[in-house]
Image: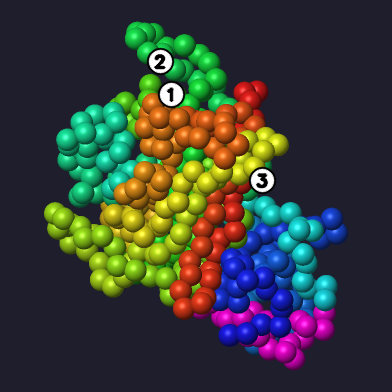
Amino acid sequence: METWIDIPKNSDFSIHNIPFGIFSTKNLKNRVGIAIGEMILDLKLSSELGVFDHLTFDFSVFDNKFLNDFISLGKSITNDVRLTIQKELSDSFSVLRNNSSVLIKQSDAQMHLPLKIGDYTDFYSSIEHASNIGSMFRDPSNPLLPNWKHIPVGYHGRASSIIASDIDIHRPKGQVLLPDQKKPVFQPSSRVDFELEMGFVIGKKSNLGDSISTDEAEDYIFGNVLFNDWSARDIQKWEYVPLGPFLGKSFASSISPWIVTIEALDLYKVKGPEQTPKVLSYLEYSGMKNYDINLEVSIQPEGSKESIVCSSNFKYMYWNMVQQLAHHTINGCNINVGDLMASGTISGKDKGSYGSMLELSWGGKNPVTLDDGSSRVFINDNDSVIMRGYCEKDGKRVGFGEVRTKLKGSK
Ligand code: CA
C-alpha cells in the first residue's frame, strides 16, 4: 500500500495504521481525526467532501469532543471508515488530494482526551512484574500469591483522573508510614512512580448478566493506547491492605492520544507464554492473542535531555486482553463503549525491561543513572515521563506516538 502523503521513514503513523483521535487547532474546535505521517486528516471535512457517502451513518459523529459516538457505530462501520481512509490516501486521484485544508500539521494541532471514559479497570497481568513486587515485599522464593496463576487479578480504578498526554500533574499528598514508625504522617509522596502499561478501549457494550467468551472478546475491543498508571508508592504501601489500591493510584493516569485499532495490530500477533497450571475453561483461548509491541520509557529532567530507562514489550503479558475481558464479565458485570482496561505494569525478564521505577531501583535501593549524570530512585519534581510504543514486521510499522506527562511539585 502506497500513499501520496509524504511519510517520514520510521513514522508510527504509516498508511497501515490509521489511528483515531480528537484534535483542535486555533481555528477548528475539537473533532475527530486520524494521524498519517506528520499530519492529521480531518474526518469532519473529509465527510463533507463525500468521502464516506457510500457508508450509511450519521457523519455528525466526527463533529464531536469524544470518539464514543463514532466507536458506538460498531466495527462494521468503523472498520469500513478506516479502510476507506486507507484507500483515499492511497488513491492519487482522491478528492482529498485537491483539498489541502483536510490535512493539518500535527505540530499545529492540540490533542485531547479521546474518550469519555465511563469505567476504568486495571489488571496486574505481567508475571515478571508481579514476581518482582512479590520478591521485594513478601517472599523472594515464593513471590506470587496463590491466586495469581488462576485469575487475571485486577481492581476498579478511577476514570475521572485519566488525562491526555501533555497535561502536567502535581505530586500527590497523603498518609505515609515512615520507616520504624507506628503512626502515619501527612506529607507529599516521596515515591512517585510511573507504570508502563497498555490500555484497551471497549468498543461494544454488553448487557448486565451476560459474559463475554474469549472467542468473542476481540469483537468488544476497539483499540489500544499507551497508558502511564502514575503511582505513589509510599501512599499505596500504607493504604492497600485489605482492599487494594486507592489514593496511591487515583491521582492520575495518562494515555496517548491516538487509539490504534486492534485491526491495525493484527499483523503483530504472537503466541503468549505457556500458562501452567492449566487455566479454568472460561479462561482458555485459541489462536494468538499476545501482541509484539516494543515499549519504551524515558525520563526527561527539566531543561535536560531524555534518558531511556526501560525497554519492554507487550508480548510478555501472562494474561492477555481476551482473558482479561472474559474474566471481567464472567460474573455478569456489564461493560460499555468507552470503558478503559489497562494491562498492569509490563515488565520483562531483564533488568532494563522493568516497567516501573520501583522495580528499576529495586525499592529505592539502586539509583538509576540518567544520561545527564543525575540519578533517580523515583520521579523528581519537574521531570517528564515519556512512553512510546510501536510494532514492526515485514517493513510495516504501526505505532502509538507518545504519552508525555510532567510531574510538578505538590499543590
Ligand atoms: Ca497499574
Name the outermost residue toward the bottom. Answer: 93
Residue type beneath disc 1:
Asp
Residue position marked by numbered label 1 in the rendering? 234
Residue position marked by numbered label 3 in the rendering? 166
Q: From which residue to which does the magenta span run?
A: 74-99
Instruction: Look at the image and tell me whether residue 62 can be seen.
Output: no
Depth check, front residue: 324 or 87: 87
Residue type beneath disc 3:
Asp
Name the outermost residue toward the left. Answer: 277
In the rendered structure, the answer to whether residue 315 lies left or right of residue 163 reads: left
- The answer to which quarter of the image holds residue 324 is bottom left
- The answer to which quarter of the image holds residue 52 is bottom right
Q: Secondary structure at mark 2?
A: loop
Image x and y of residue 248, in percent: 46, 30
In percent of the image, x 52 and y 75: which residue is there? 396
Residue 300 lies in the magenta stretch: no
Q: Secondary structure at mark 3?
A: loop
In percent of the image, x 33 and y 43: which residue is there? 129
Residue position marked by numbered label 2 in the rendering? 177
